[in-house]
Amino acid sequence: MSTAIDSTAKLTRKDFESDQEVRWCPGCGDYSILAQTQKVLPDLGVPREKFVMVSGIGCSSRFPYYVNTYGLHSIHGRAPAVASGVKLSNPDLFVWVITGDGDGLSIGGNHLVHCMRRNVDLKIILFNNKIYGLTKGQYSPTSELGKKTKSTPMGSIDYPINPIHLALAAEATFVARSLDVDTKHLVEILQRVAKHKGAAFVEVFQNCNIFNDGAFRNFTDREIRDDRMIAIQHGKPLIFGKDHDKGLVLKGIKLEVVKLGNGVSEFDLLVYDEEDPDPTLAYLLSGMSYPDFPVPVGVFRNIRKPTYDEMMLGQVEKSINLYGKGDLEKLFNAGDTWVVE
């Protein structure tokens, strides 16, 4: 943190801008995610010294340098583990994990899964550009089948990971998706991520204009977005299209796109419940992809469960009540001891 803290002052976006030179490629989608995060943080009513940004390795992981809070640029894939330690030892902190598709889903996949299934109170932003950008363009765990890169000149033969599928399967209590080019939507999602108590995961479609430019263009361009994407909203019918003339229904156990009219109305469409403890519908929606379906963005899941840190503190308190505060010196010298000469 580069400036002195006045805990009584009203915070602004400027307070969360660091004095570090931002070293992303001109036009990178990371700028948008950074700007929207800096816009959201001042309105949370949280003192600046209570924020900690933890990252791994990759372009996205330079994030902590650019946000004027406490931060750690840790090691490849280990941000969730480091962040869990920070949160558990300092439960009053608001800890964010910044990661990318390579960092979080390849070397760090194991750590990411376990912090989500434990429901550690972390805010996790996964920048997904479907490429390793920092190391200049190798295919990543989210690259499409057949992707030709420097490391896959004949085309990737790996089936890609769907990050939302993974988060739902790991039982994260908040799961969402947004995109860098829709700043209004991104702000709304980040606000909800920030306010969720528990493991909050958001995948952000982020364009790497150097090594994977246009990876999402066929459904995110402003002119076509309304017809090729759907914003899922709690308590509202799943409707989309520039003229709001298409929607989703459930036929058996499969989703189907229908056109409104000719006897089909909004009342026939699925109404989404993000608070449903059963993630089955969320899983079906997250599997949709263009051109067969509109690509979904929004909140897939939002439930409340006790967090790992809450339960850990409860156990600590219970243990103290039962056995007292304990004595570390006695513990070290308990049982058999040896002297090594």
Image (spheres, rainbow, N blue to C red):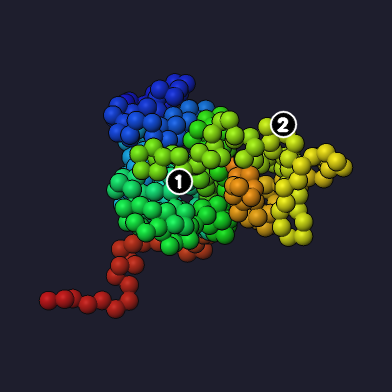
- Quadrant of image for the N terminus: top left
Residue at the location (40% across, 24% down)? 15
Q: Give me the C-alpha separation between circle 1 and circle 2.
A: 29 Å
Q: Which mark is residue 243?
A: 2
- SS for callout 1: strand
- SS for callout 2: loop
| Residue mark closest to the camera, 1 vs 2 | 2
For the residue pair 227 and 248, the one nearer the viewer reads as 227
Residue that extends furthest to the right in the rendered view of this protein:
263
Residue at the location (38% across, 53% down)? 148
Neighbor class of circle 2 (other Cα within 10 Å; few <14, some 14-19, many 20+) is few
**Residue at the spot of label 1:** 128
Judge whether 53 appears above or below 327 on screen.
above
Q: Residue 242 appears at what percent x and percent y?
A: 68, 32
Q: Residue 335 appears at what percent x and percent y?
A: 32, 76
- Quadrant of image for the C terminus: bottom left
Residue at the location (31% across, 53% down)? 150
Judge whether 334 appears above or below 149 on screen.
below
Residue at the location (33% across, 34% down)? 25
For the residue pair 263 and 74, the one nearer the viewer reads as 263
Judge whether 335 appears above or below 31 on screen.
below
Q: Quadrant of residue 178?
A: top right
For the residue pair 25 and 310, the one nearer the viewer reads as 25
Q: Residue 287 appears at what percent x and percent y?
A: 60, 54
Q: Amino acid at mark 1?
A: Asn
Point out the tag, 1 or 2, that comes first from the N-terminus: 1
